[in-house]
């Protein structure tokens, strides 16, 4: 079993979706990340250099959500997984992307895509 750094509830506005109305206006998205890596070196050294800078990663994820455009949540999730895996210490990542205001004509809290990559 690996160690995990969890980021929960990262929210940003973005333009992602298939429908024309989704491509015209920003809407809210929420991302959860589970980064799997060995945290023992950081635990022993107490140095940021020995772990993932989750603040920097959170900023990169927010920039991805707000700065890119994708039709599918699946594509957005893949892009975010790539950002996390760019740090060689991360052995795998679980990414959940939630569309908080989906244009669906029923009462629904959100829709989400969850992927695991290594």
Image: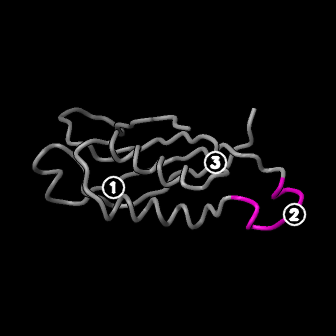
Which image quadrant: the C terminus? top right
Residue drawn at point x = 17 percent, y = 35 percent: 105
Foreground mark, 2 or 1, reads 2
- Asked whether, in this view, residue 113 is left or right of residue 23, the answer is right
Q: Distance between the Cα atoms at labels 3 and 1?
A: 27 Å
Question: Residue 63: percent from the left, percent from the top?
Answer: 40, 65
- Asked whether, in this view, residue 60 is left or right of residue 44, the answer is left
Mark 2, residue position: 45
- Depth check, front residue: 81 or 8: 81
Q: Quadrant of residue 23?
A: bottom left
Mark 1, residue position: 28
Residue drawn at point x = 67 percent, y = 51 percent: 89
Characterize the local packing of mark 3: few (<14), some (14-19) or many (20 or more) Cα atoms within 10 angstroms: many
> Considering only vertical position in the picture, is 105 above or below 70?
above
> Considering only vertical position in the picture, is 54 above or below 75?
below
Q: Earlier in the sequence, mark 2 or mark 1?
A: 1
Mark 3, residue position: 90
Magenta span:
41-51
> Considering only vertical position in the picture, is 15 above or below 37?
below
Marks 3/1 in contact by CB < 8 Å: the verdict is: no
Q: Main secondary structure of the magenta part?
A: helix
Q: Distance between the Cα atoms at labels 3 and 2?
A: 18 Å
């Amino acid at each position: 079993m690996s160690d995990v750094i969890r980021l929960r509830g990262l929210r940003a506005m973005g333009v992602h979706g298939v429908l024309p109305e989704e491509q015209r206006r920003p809407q809210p998205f929420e991302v959860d990340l589970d980064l799997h890596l060995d945290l023992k070196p950081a635990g022993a050294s107490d140095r940021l250099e020995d772990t993932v800078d989750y603040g920097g990663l959170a900023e990169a994820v927010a920039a991805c959500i707000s700065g890119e455009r994708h039709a599918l949540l699946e594509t957005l999730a893949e892009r975010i997984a790539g950002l996390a895996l760019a740090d060689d210490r991360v052995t795998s990542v679980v990414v959940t992307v939630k569309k908080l205001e989906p244009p669906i004509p029923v009462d629904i809290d959100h829709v989400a895509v969850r992927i695991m990559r290594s």
